[in-house]
Amino acid sequence: MLSHAILEQLGVFVHPDVLTADQCRDWRQRAVKAESRPGFVYKQGKSRLDEDARRTQEVGLTPEDAKRLDQQIAAVLPALDRHFDMALGPLCEYRCMLYDSGDFFVPHYDVTAVEGETVRNVHKRTVTLLIFLNAPDDPEVPYQGGELTFFGLLDVPDSDQHGFSVEAKQGKLVAFKSDILHSVTPVLSGNRCVIVAWFHDQSKHRETTHGG
């Protein structure tokens, strides 16, 4: 696994402890109690269930919970703007992802080229934000496997064939361009829980609002 410094040189932002252990526990408990749905994949402008490509459960955050998360991570936002050299604007599409034993997500991108019939926001994504709510060394809810792995970070031939994993730590925030290829390896045991949200391209919001 690459160090935080090397990951940041390759374009991946890392903050080691944006949430406390108590905050992570609270988010996990909320996610487990809430109603979840299977995670979809996006292909040819449509969202659909494809358990050969992705197996996980999603829990959407309420507007109140999204506001609470914004407050908890507010101190990190200026550093994110500097890292990505842009004013990122508000976060959107908040959700918790629950991975049980055997769950995974094959290499994929978080952004689509165009807006589709059933995919209203995915083409607007610019930066993906992820927070680990537990980790393999978690004293309460450990898991094994489920590694967040990036591909194509190096400017060398066949870079997409070489993956680099991020060490999961409870409360750690990872942010990256949504067009970076990445995966989640199969969870071997236990349950992996993360929060994910996206920054959107504000110009595409304006096109959607004012376009025909």
Image: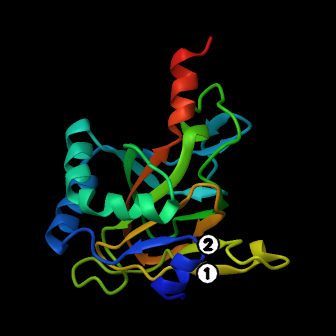
Dot 1 amino acid type: Phe
Residue under label 2, please give it: 150
User: Where is residue 157, by image quadrant?
Assistant: bottom right
Disc ID at residue 164: 1
Q: Secondary structure at mark 2?
A: strand
Q: Position of residue 101 (x, y in %)?
A: 46, 71
Q: Quadrant of the C terminus?
A: top right
In this orientation, does residue 130 appear? no
Q: Mark 2 or mark 1, which has the lower sequence index?
A: 2
User: Where is residue 113, by image quadrant?
Assistant: top right
Q: Residue furthest left?
A: 22
Query: At x 57% / y 70%, what residue is drawn?
Result: 11
**Structural crowding at the residue carrying mark 1, measured as other residues with C-alpha within 10 Å and reported as few (<14), some (14–19) or many (≥20):** some
Query: At x 54% / y 85%, what residue is drawn?
Result: 6
Q: Residue furthest top?
A: 212
Q: Quadrant of the N terminus?
A: bottom right
